[in-house]
Image: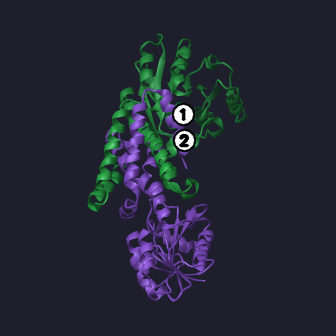
Chain colours: A purple, B green
């Protein structure tokens, strides 16, 4: 099918590279450098968003705050194209769908994959393989649109779970926003506490535990707006305080360690 | 040289495999299965700890709580062999050195490398390449013993930093114990907060952020005895509370995110 990709960063670039052998892929990015980088890897590009149309589907993989404006710009003239948006939070898309033009077809899709890297240069379709993709229908998602989003996920090597925007956003609060916030706090405290240069003293443990603190700032700000995050941070402080209280009591610590291990994904 | 390795788990196994082409390596473990696994990979083993002697050096890579008893058993009859212990905390070894027999040569060494895997089967000398090794002299460390420990670290592909037991243990509190405790707390809260099965919803972010929660329990209990951990956990709760207070204020959040990123190792 004719497939447009709006936003040629890490995610959109990976989608374009991963699907170009199956579909007639055309890319667009506001940045001429991103368009050039995609062209250099053999992706056809256009110079204006609306030139991705006509198409059978357009994947919207812009930064989170640009998802709704991009959908609005496309929905007005999509002519039956399915708009598949890959944003990290879905509440605003659900709202947009309620007021979208007649005939608009909008469906959410979220690959649970990522990296602290950014830009087309870091794009690699292998990042999607074996990952869960959440398909998030809107009020403007028909069966064909939902099936199309699920097909794209499977073509990228992912597995499909369907959920509502509300469930999706609560899941993101727990699995993305909470660990991001924890990593930001941990990074700062570990640096202040270490009596040796971290370049010397830190092993892979602290590096992995703080990797999410390297999330690009705009994405991080978007994620930190996830619903329920404040309550999760309160719970995290309580769980840390419980560990503090157990220090020196090996049987209490053992129970907390075993629970933490069992609860890991 | 003749090099004994006491404790053939992940770390001792990696040391034995990584040094057997350079030295005459003999291994010992209390577990017959571990000895068999080492033999199967071509490591000569003995059935009693003391049969590692006579030697030029013995690397002690037992579980943390067994380090001091093992050093005591070896020191009485080491006959000039350098005892290089790889424990994750050094205060108890410093104490032991003070009361060790005349002529005992004891030096600490700590590779800042690890994995949630355990046992000889998971041992891989590549885990040490490019890693920092902290050399921790005791009151029974002469120049030759210190140089020997540093040489072993470099032969394993690591870099060497010398520090005191006190600095070492404070560093471990910051770079190992603190992120371990944070991972244990995060794992539990994320599981409770997620409205979807984590096997579906969790991407690599949460997995990496909670990896240390899979630390084997006995090692984790040892690490959680690191000095100053309680204060670091109080600081971590304060840093999380500061993030909570900044939610909804993008300029305040941006400053905290940038600091967290800058403070990463």
As measured in the structure, the alpha-carbon distance from the residue carrying label 2 to the one carrying label 1 is: 9 Å
According to the picture, the residue beneath numbered tag 1 turns out to be: B217
Location of residue B236 with respect to B199 vertically, above or below: above
Question: A104 or B258, which lies in front?
Answer: A104
Residue B115 visible within the image = no
Place of residue B264 in the rendered image (x, y in percent of width and height, measured from the top left): 38, 49
Chain letter behind tag 1: B
Secondary structure category for the residue under label 2: helix
Location of residue B219 with respect to A67 vertically, above or below: above
Q: Quadrant of residue B18?
A: top right
According to the picture, the residue beneath numbered tag 2 turns out to be: A261
Place of residue B13 in the rendered image (x, y in percent of width and height, measured from the top left): 61, 34
Q: Quadrant of residue A200?
A: top left
Q: In which quarter of the image is the N terminus of chain A?
A: bottom right
Around disc 2, counting alpha carbons within 10 Å, would you say few (fewer than 14), some (14 to 19), or many (20 or more)? many
Residue located at (55% from left, 50% from top): A265
Around disc 1, counting alpha carbons within 10 Å, would you say few (fewer than 14), some (14 to 19), or many (20 or more)? some
Location of residue B28 with respect to A161 vertically, above or below: above
């Amino acid at each position: 099918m004719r497939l447009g990709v709006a936003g040629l960063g890490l995610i959109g670039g990976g989608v374009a590279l991963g699907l170009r052998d199956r579909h007639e892929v055309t890319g667009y990015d506001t940045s001429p450098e991103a368009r050039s980088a995609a062209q250099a890897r053999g992706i056809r590009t256009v110079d204006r968003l609306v030139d991705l149309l006509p198409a059978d589907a357009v994947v919207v993989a812009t930064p989170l705050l640009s998802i709704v404006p991009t959908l609005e710009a496309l929905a007005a003239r999509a002519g039956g194209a399915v708009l598949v948006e890959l944003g990290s939070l879905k509440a605003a898309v659900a709202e947009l769908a309620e007021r979208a033009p007649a005939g608009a077809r909008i469906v959410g899709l979220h690959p649970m994959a990522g990296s602290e890297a950014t830009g087309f240069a870091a794009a690699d379709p292998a990042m999607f393989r074996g990952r869960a993709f959440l398909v998030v229908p809107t009020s403007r998602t028909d069966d064909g649109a939902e099936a199309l989003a699920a097909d794209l996920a499977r073509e990228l090597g992912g597995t499909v779970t369907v959920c509502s925007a509300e469930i999706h956003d609560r899941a993101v609060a727990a699995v993305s926003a909470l660990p991001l916030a924890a990593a930001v706090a941990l990074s700062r405290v570990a640096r202040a506490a270490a009596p040796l240069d971290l370049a010397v003293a830190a092993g892979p443990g602290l590096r992995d535990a703080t990797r999410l603190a390297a999330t690009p700032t705009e994405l991080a700000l978007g994620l930190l707006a996830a619903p329920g995050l404040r309550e999760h941070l309160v719970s995290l402080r309580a769980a840390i305080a419980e560990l503090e209280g157990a220090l020196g009591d090996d049987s209490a610590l053992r129970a907390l360690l075993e629970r933490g291990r069992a609860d890991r994904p």
